[in-house]
Image (spheres, rainbow, N blue to C red):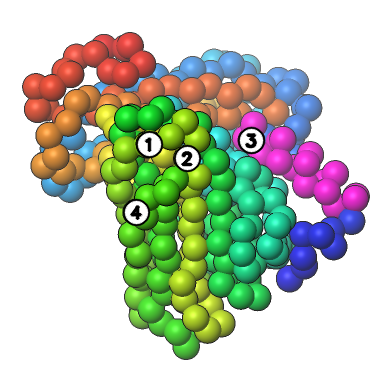
Amino acid sequence: MRTHSALLDSRRRALTVALVAGLLGVSSAYAGVAGGSPSFTVGPCVVTEGNAGTTACNFSISISSGAQGPLEFSYQTASPGNLLSPVSDASLEAPLVGTDTLLYNTGETMGGWTVENGSVELKSSLHWQPSHYRQSLDMHGNSPGTIARDIATVPGQTYLVSFAFSGHPVCAAVVKTMSVSFGNQQLGSFTFDSTGFSPQNMGWRYESVVVTANASVSRLRFASTTMGGCGPALDDISVTPTGAASSGIDYVATSRHHDDPVILPQSTTAHTVTVNVLGDTTVEADEDFELQVCLAGGACQTAVGGIDDDDGIGDTLFANGFE
């Protein structure tokens, strides 16, 4: 484990290069080597949600001819209404830790987040299973930590705050607790029992709370309230105006990052990426989400997944205008 402040400048530059490649979904081995890469398109999908279980939303990738070898694709889901940057701040991917665990102490920044109190650790998928993409946050570094960031909000607008919640699985303190606030409003104290879970199976659970903003800037804050050596784990954070699809609440977060891409054989012309839509009995308008697909050494394409709630509210026209 290394502290953020102790990183060498060369390491910072390497992380910056890796982050840019990661945000583009480009494997570092392929970055800038686009010769022979074919063009591709990603078609949208629309499904009826249902009242329980999951429904498959299938995105069709159509690949033109001309590939000179196997194709490496990465992809990730995102909510188009999320007020947080979908990768760097929502999925806690800034900076990229690689094979490290990076410790952040009081006053230090981590992407768009600031450590207000205590310390936290960014962990890669080599340390434990993230909920989404490559990294997640251990809310207890050397002591229980608190992270926060300011978000521009509209007074009187209601927002859905959601996040993936788990706990350090290898500790005597089995039950982990965390408090969450938005502006001057407490959203609650959340508890996770890590009994039976492991670094390979973290048992991530999504929580969501609807809150009405009462100021033009609202500070979103997560604070570990677990005493002892280990605490809660945090990932896949979303703040969306109510009515927008939210990861973990309306659909299952789905991703393959560029370090572990889908490899398609040469001459492949079609592939399908499936995102499962979560059914519930909540009466709500139609919603949509996004799937971004990137070809190593090439471009990225984004397609929309439409969720028809089949309640007769806002049917046919989705938030982004497609039918």
Quick one: quadrant of the C terminus?
top left
Return the mark for residue 214.
Answer: 1
Which residue appears at 48% of the width and 57% of the height?
222
Q: Residues within 10 Å of mark 4 (few under 14, many from 20)?
A: some
Q: Is residue 18 magenta?
A: yes
| 16 lies left or right of 131 | right
Q: Amino acid at mark 3?
A: Leu
List the residue tagged with mark 2. Answer: 218
Residue 201 is at least partly visible in this image:
no
The residue nearer to you, when weighing 57 against 189, is 189
Residue 238 is at least partly visible in this image:
yes
Q: State the image quarter where residue 300 is shown.
A: top right
- Disc 2 + disc 1, Cβ < 8 Å: yes
Q: State the image quarter where residue 306 is shown.
A: top left
Q: Residues within 10 Å of mark 3 (few under 14, many from 20)?
A: some
| Residue 262 locus on image (x, y percent) | 54, 41
List the residue tagged with mark 4. Answer: 187
List the residue tagged with mark 3. Answer: 23
Magenta part of the chain: 9-25
| Disc 1 secondary structure class | loop
